[in-house]
Image (tube, grey):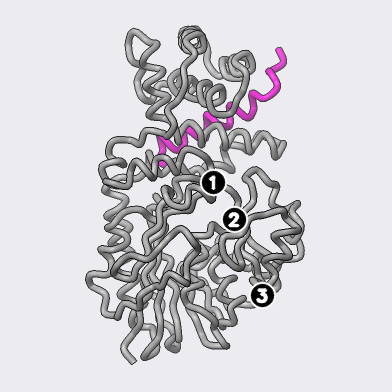
């Protein structure tokens, strides 16, 4: 019997959710294996969209499911996961109920299939709706404190597509070519859903994909004028590209061969130069000191929840503690690699204080305050001169990822 059109994408979405919720994998890591049997770009994108919307709204989807069952389904029950997918498609992706039923029920058999059909039919007849903003898991809301409601509002929609231009002086030119918005020189913002490789300027290397928040750490080092900068944990290379475009001589260090291969490919496409170096920053020793260092440290990445809603369900105290220990070790080593008077920018795409503000407590470097004129309109540095962004900011302009950024200097 022929399978309904679209079932491959739904099966891939189910695999993605299983990888995240049961094995603790990221969406990015799980994506290749989960979609290996899906041929079309559009179907791969649909699988990712279904899984992402389930993870974004899972607390609220579970409330709806529980309201239509006499006995709560186990959290890891396959029927619950499929029901989450069915509701996410109907309520978030505007898939007609008959298409949802035709493409999702074949993922189940026997009693679970009849149960899912009954629950979904009951809920569609009630005319249900999701809240304006997703409900965060209780432990996440507690960690993010007073900002949790605003952050949740910022997570309601997937983010737009941000680009960084190789030549910021061409911002208005590319803004017109791509029908884009721009929030600061060198930045473009497009609607999500674009096939990146087909956009004008991609093949010519005129720009690369990079959230505007992720572009700020390199911007804060300014023009290189031929000086030497070390980009630690550099791959896949967005910040190294920025630094090279700003006139720095860039050493791009990363431990991953696969990610360094991506960095090399990105530099080749864009037509810039760097010196990639595969090494473990915890044991590597440089042959010379650097004028500047960019440490965008490995982190829990909770600030990227708009595009990676898996972090809402994978990250807890253990992961935060492990990352904070790694960040402390990296920061301590990097401080010793600066020339006298050299500058270091420390950044993490995390919303956790343990990975941001707390990491500066033992720093041997002096804080160099970030000024308002270095930032896009709509965000401001803190009173101490560091920068904390989160997905609840710049909502009227499409939002921003969460980052902590501090600029430090060694004593001259």
Whether tag 1 and tag 2 are in contact, CB under 8 A, the answer is yes
Whether tag 3 and tag 1 are in contact, CB under 8 A, the answer is no
Q: Position of residue 351 (x, y in %)?
A: 35, 53
The relative height of residue 110 versus residue 229 in the rendered view (above or below) is above
Q: Where is mark 3, residue-wise?
A: 272
Q: SS at mark 3?
A: loop
Cα separation, mark 1 vs mark 2, equals: 9 Å
Q: Where is mark 1, residue-wise?
A: 159
Where are the magenta residues, as a range? 1-25
Q: Which label belongs to residue 136?
A: none
- For the point 35% across and 20% down, the residue is 74
On screen, residue 127 versus residue 162, left or right, reads left
Q: Where is mark 2, residue-wise?
A: 162
Sequence-wise, the earlier of marks 3 and 1 is 1
- For the point 57% across and 88% down, the residue is 226
Cα separation, mark 3 vs mark 2, equals: 20 Å
Q: SS at mark 1?
A: loop
Q: Position of residue 171 (x, y in %)?
A: 67, 66
For disc 1, the neighbor class at 10 Å (few under 14, some 14 to 19, many from 20) is: many
For disc 2, the neighbor class at 10 Å (few under 14, some 14 to 19, many from 20) is: many
For disc 3, the neighbor class at 10 Å (few under 14, some 14 to 19, many from 20) is: some
């Amino acid at each position: 019997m022929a399978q309904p059109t679209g079932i491959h994408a739904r099966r891939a979405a189910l695999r993605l959710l299983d990888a995240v919720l049961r094995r603790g994998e990221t969406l990015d890591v799980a994506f290749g294996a989960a979609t290996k049997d899906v041929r079309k770009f559009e179907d791969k994108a649909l699988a990712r969209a279904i899984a992402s919307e389930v993870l974004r709204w899972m607390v609220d989807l579970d409330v709806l499911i529980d309201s239509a069952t006499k006995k709560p389904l186990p959290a890891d029950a396959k029927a619950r996961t499929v029901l989450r997918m069915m509701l996410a498609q109907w309520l978030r992706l505007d898939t007609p109920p008959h298409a949802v039923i035709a493409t999702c029920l074949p993922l189940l058999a026997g009693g679970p299939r009849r149960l899912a059909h009954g629950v979904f039919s009951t809920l569609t007849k009630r005319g249900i709706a999701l809240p304006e903003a997703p409900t965060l898991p209780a432990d996440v809301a507690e960690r993010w404190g007073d900002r949790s409601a605003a952050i949740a509002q910022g997570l309601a929609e997937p983010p737009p597509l941000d680009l960084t231009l190789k030549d910021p002086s061409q911002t208005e030119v590319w803004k017109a070519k791509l029908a884009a918005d721009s929030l600061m020189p060198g930045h473009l913002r497009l609607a999500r859903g674009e096939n990146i490789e087909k956009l004008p300027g991609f093949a010519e290397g005129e720009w690369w994909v990079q959230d505007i928040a992720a572009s700020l750490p390199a911007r804060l080092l300014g023009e290189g004028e031929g000086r030497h900068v070390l980009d630690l944990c550099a791959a896949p290379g967005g910040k190294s590209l920025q630094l090279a475009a700003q006139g720095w001589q860039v050493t791009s260090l990363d431990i991953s061969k696969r990610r360094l291969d991506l960095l090399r490919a990105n530099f080749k496409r864009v037509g810039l130069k760097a010196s990639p170096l595969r090494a473990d920053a915890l044991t590597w020793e440089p042959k010379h000191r650097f004028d500047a260092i960019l440490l965008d440290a490995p982190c829990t990445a909770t600030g990227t929840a708009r595009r990676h809603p898996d972090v809402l369900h994978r990250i807890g105290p253990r992961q935060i503690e492990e990352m904070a220990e790694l960040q402390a070790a990296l920061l301590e080593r990097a401080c010793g690699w600066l020339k006298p008077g050299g500058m270091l920018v420390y950044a993490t795409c995390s919303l956790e204080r343990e990975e941001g503000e707390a990491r500066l407590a033992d720093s041997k470097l002096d804080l160099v305050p970030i000024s308002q004129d270095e930032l896009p309109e709509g965000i401001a540095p803190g009173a101490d001169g560091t920068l904390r962004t989160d997905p609840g900011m710049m909502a009227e302009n499409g939002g921003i990822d969460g980052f902590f950024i501090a600029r430090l200097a060694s004593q001259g």
